[in-house]
Amino acid sequence: MQHTAVRIDQLTAGYARTTVLRGLSATIPRGQVTAIVGHNGSGKSTLLGVLAGTVTIESGTVEHTLGRPAFVVQHTAIPPTLPLTVRDAVAMGRWAHRGPWRRLTRADRAVVGECLERMDLTDLASRRLDTLSGGQRQRTLLAQALAQRSELLLLDEPATGLDTASQAAISRVLTEVAESGVTVVQATHDRDEAARADHCLLLRDGQLIAAGLPEDVLVGA
């Protein structure tokens, strides 16, 4: 039996005086990968922002009991000149539990090491972010999110502009964490990536056009 992780009912939301999502209702299944698809301007990033709590709801409701979500932005949204090493950046994921700037415990350090290894970043742990490729920075951001140990993982176009190896690594890890019970929601314009998801939401002009299995939804994308 499929369980619902997030229930969205008649959601209207946007930015300042611009409404982007209008009366959108949808459900997101628990412990699966959901792909949000649609053309630029369809409302994909806005919906992610609502789920992340960074976009204010004008009306309607969003209900879930999964705790604080982990939100992975595109690597281009992060200044590459930040004076951080890969390990420092991943360790920031533990702030959700420890608070910023507090000393990490042995258990925290173990989580950071596990996430570095999972994203094949152990050998790059002491490298600064400004020395990394785009794919390496994106994998670092995903490792940071995984370090939060959240039950809800949100990603905004995580594979955009990355090399094939990095795209494959990210796709593999998203499948693995969903299999472990984490609910994954990613906005993507990559049809192949969307086809690998368990569930799809197709948006157009801020409204939900179709929802269901990728093979059914992507026909109208």
Image: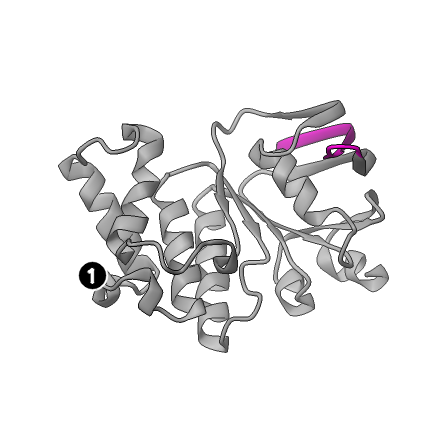
Examine the structure image and report whether residue 174 is included in the region drawn in magenta: no
Position of residue 184 in the picture relative to residue 81 (left or right): right
- Give the magenta part as a residue range: 3-17
| Residue at (48% x, 59% y) in the render | 75
Disc 1 designates what residue? 126
Magenta span: helix, strand or loop, mainly? strand
Is residue 162 something that shows in the picture?
Answer: yes
Label 1's element?
loop
Q: Residues within 10 Å of mark 1 (few under 14, many from 20)?
A: few
Which quadrant would the C terminus be assigned to in this image? Answer: bottom right
What percent of the width, then of the height, locates residue 166? 45, 70
Quarter location, residue 125:
bottom left
User: Which residue is found at the position 50% from the left and 69% from the top?
Assistant: 167
Q: Is residue 1 visible?
A: no
Q: Residue furthest bottom?
A: 164
Q: Residue 187: x and y, percent?
A: 64, 53
Camera-nearest residue between 69 and 217: 69
Q: Residue at point 46% right, 36% down?
A: 151
- 135 lies above or below 32: below
Q: Nearer the viewer, residue 163 or 126?
A: 126
* Quadrant position of residue 218: bottom right
| Residue toward you, 44 or 79 | 79
Measured from the top left, where is residue 85 in percent x and y? 26, 56
Q: State the quadrant of the N terminus.
A: top right
- Say if 87 sits above or below 46 in the image: below
Pinpoint residue 63: horizontal percent, then vertical percent. Answer: 64, 24
Q: Amino acid at mark 1?
A: Ser
User: As drawn, is 93 to the left or to the right of 74?
Assistant: left
Asked whether residue 11 is drawn in magenta, I would say: yes
Residue 114 as seen in the image, left or right of residue 185: left
- Figure check: 118 above or below 207: below
The reply, left or right, for residue 19 in relation to residue 65 is right
